[in-house]
């Protein structure tokens, strides 16, 4: 073994940042030394192939083992490949055989002349065929932590001085490995932050203007807050149920902000807006060339949410044939990018929301039962605005403030008559509709009285007293009739259009896809785009 040559290899290691390159340089540097037949590095990592591992019968603990990470040698037989990592010794249980004992105890093993005790080796015929004379095995230790094991098989009879050089080289290799791992982690965190920032910028553009805390003091809202406080600190999946516009996304944000994951991102996916053919790419990412238009590698939402929360908005809109792939990713915490066969692991908490009756969808065969139960570990129902009329004054005042700030205009005035009119309205579009109505009123009022009565659809108004309005209880049939009348009024006023700033959806304060679904349920014909 040439000390000067090993010093050159050690200096080269110190300049590398990639873990794969460092590992390759270690074994190649040793294999280039005179007489070295084979050099290998195993790194300590969690058990992964236990059921298929050839050493499973000898393994005392499947939680951790030594993984073969790099191998290089000079075989005597032409065509032999000693660089592959999937052979018989690809894993070593800790404490088992020579390599396993070094990995467990951190004590080196040096056999000066292997011919004196061939029984020490699992394959003595290989030792004989390759004319191996000595064996050295050193622990890779950095700051008292065993990172792995470095082993070499020598065709020359190695002495103590050469073994001491191997010890010094192993120390340098351990430092290089630790540094490369640190650089890899820094790079991973940088990429994760870039990914989170990219998605969060998108979220800021799409976020509701009313984004903030849950507002209200009604008993219905207090019940929701109590449920949030109960489930947020756990890692349980949450299914948020409720009509469109009730604030389901705000509930999801509250769950995330009160959880142990609040220091990482909450990534939102609007499942209804993803085209069928792009579902896998959006959720799991893709590699360059996976399909037409895939010009570069792209990470998906699952990877962006690693360590944080993934909010699946309108989860009931996911096509049935794609739900199985989502279920697998949620259950196993693993996924593959489109066009790639490498399984990636993530730690993601799932919070989903829908305005559909998923239990009914399961019975109708439109939603997988196993996915439904996986998502609804802890269901939370968000009440519609008509069930929390006591919160109307606080919500209205909040939206007036938001509107004045956004429009940079004097704050409009809410009168007692305004609050009476608000309380007597059915609010089919819920809080989102309330916000839109107040913003339109603020534009018209220019700082004066808001005149909300002029903006509320007449088909859904009544004129009870303030006390009666706050205490009124509407039957389910009445609510459905009023909602239907309100939809028809909005369609008439918008000329049958759903989309656009003057469409019926904008007038109602709901999403166009939600309005289209409601019209379909009511048996209405296809409206204008």
Image (cartoon, rainbow, N blue to C red):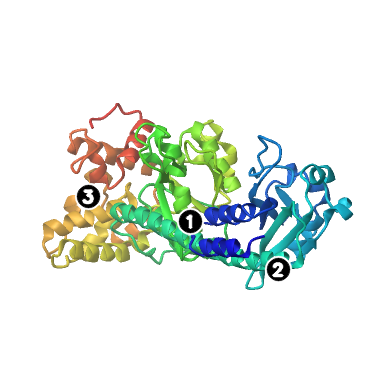
Residue 369: quadrant of the picture: top right
Left or right side of 284 for 161: right
Give the quarter of the figure containing the N terminus.
bottom right
Left or right side of 344 for 355: left
Secondary-structure class at tag 1: strand
Secondary-structure class at tag 2: helix
Observer-side mark, 1 or 3, equals 1
| Crowding near the residue tagged with mark 3, few <14, some 14–19, many ≥20 C-alpha atoms within 10 Å | many
Task: Say the numbered circle drawn on residue 309.
Answer: 1
The number of numbered badges drawn on the structure is 3
Observer-side mark, 3 or 2, equals 2
Residue at x 21%, y 33% (from the top left corner): 496
Give the residue at mark 2.
Answer: 164
Q: Are marks 3 and 2 in contact (CB under 8 Å)?
A: no
Q: Which one is nearer the viewer's eye here, 478 or 112?
A: 112
Query: Farthest residue toward the top?
Result: 525
Q: Earlier in the sequence, mark 1 or mark 3?
A: 1
Q: CA distance from mark 2 to mark 1?
A: 51 Å
Specify whether residue 317 is in view: no
| Crowding near the residue tagged with mark 2, few <14, some 14–19, many ≥20 C-alpha atoms within 10 Å | few
| Crowding near the residue tagged with mark 1, few <14, some 14–19, many ≥20 C-alpha atoms within 10 Å | many
Observer-side mark, 2 or 1, equals 2
Q: Which one is nearer the viewer's eye here, 166 or 497?
A: 166
Task: Say the numbered circle drawn on residue 189.
Answer: none
Secondary-structure class at tag 3: loop
Residue 514: quadrant of the picture: top left
Left or right side of 471 for 367: right
Give the residue at mark 3.
Answer: 456
Residue at x 50%, y 54% (from the top left corner): 380
Left or right side of 110 for 196: left
Q: Position of residue 171 (x, y in %)?
A: 63, 68
Q: Earlier in the sequence, mark 3 or mark 2?
A: 2
């Amino acid at each position: 073994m040439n000390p000067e040559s090993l010093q050159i290899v050690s200096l080269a290691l110190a300049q590398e940042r990639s873990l794969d390159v460092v590992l390759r340089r270690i074994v190649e540097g040793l294999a280039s030394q005179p007489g070295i037949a084979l050099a290998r590095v195993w790194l300590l990592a969690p058990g992964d192939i236990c059921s298929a591992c050839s050493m499973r019968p000898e393994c005392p603990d499947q939680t951790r083992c030594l993984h073969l990470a790099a191998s290089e040698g000079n075989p005597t037989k032409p065509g032999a490949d000693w660089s592959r990592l999937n052979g018989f010794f690809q894993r070593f249980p800790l404490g088992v055989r020579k390599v396993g004992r070094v990995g467990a105890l951190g004590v080196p093993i040096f056999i000066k002349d292997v011919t004196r005790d061939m029984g020490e080796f699992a394959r003595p015929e290989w030792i004989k065929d390759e004319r191996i004379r000595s064996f050295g095995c050193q622990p890779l230790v950095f700051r008292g932590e065993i990172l792995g094991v470095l082993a070499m098989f020598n065709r020359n009879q190695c002495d103590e001085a050469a073994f001491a050089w191997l010890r010094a080289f192993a120390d340098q290799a351990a430092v290089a490995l630790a540094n490369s791992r640190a650089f890899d982690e820094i790079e991973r965190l940088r990429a994760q932050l870039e990914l989170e920032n990219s998605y969060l910028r998108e979220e800021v553009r799409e976020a509701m203007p009313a984004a903030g805390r849950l507002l209200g003091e009604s008993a219905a809202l207090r019940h929701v807050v109590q449920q949030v406080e109960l489930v947020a600190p756990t890692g349980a999946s949450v299914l948020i149920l409720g009509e469109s516009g009730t604030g389901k996304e705000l509930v999801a944000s509250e769950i995330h902000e009160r959880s142990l994951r609040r220091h990482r991102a909450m990534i939102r996916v609007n499942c209804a807006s993803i085209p069928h053919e792009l579902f896998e790419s959006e959720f799991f990412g893709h590699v360059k060339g996976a399909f037409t238009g895939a010009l570069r590698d792209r990470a998906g939402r699952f990877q962006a949410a690693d360590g944080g929360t993934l909010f699946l908005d309108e989860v009931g809109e996911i096509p049935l044939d794609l739900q199985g792939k989502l279920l697998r990713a949620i259950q196993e915490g693993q996924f593959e990018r489109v066009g790639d066969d490498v399984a990636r692991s993530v730690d993601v908490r799932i919070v989903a929301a829908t305005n559909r009756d998923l239990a009914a969808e399961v019975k109708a065969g439109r939603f997988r039962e196993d996915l439904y139960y996986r998502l609804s570990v802890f269901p939370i129902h968000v009440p519609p605005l008509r069930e929390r009329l006591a919160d109307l004054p606080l919500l209205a005042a909040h939206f007036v403030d938001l509107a004045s700030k956004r429009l940079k205009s004097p704050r409009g005035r809410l009168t007692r008559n305004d609050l009476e009119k608000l309380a007597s309205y059915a609010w089919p579009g819920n809080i989102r509709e309330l916000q839109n109505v107040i913003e339109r009123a603020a534009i018209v009022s220019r700082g004066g009285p808001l005149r909300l009565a002029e903006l509320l659809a007449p088909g859904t108004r009544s004129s009870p007293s303030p006390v009666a309005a706050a205490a009124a209880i509407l039957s389910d049939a009445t609510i459905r009739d009023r909602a239907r009348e309100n939809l028809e009024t909005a369609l008439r006023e918008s000329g049958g259009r759903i989309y656009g700033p003057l469409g019926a959806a904008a007038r109602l304060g709901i999403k166009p896809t939600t309005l289209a679904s409601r019209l379909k349920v009511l048996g209405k014909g296809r409206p204008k785009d």
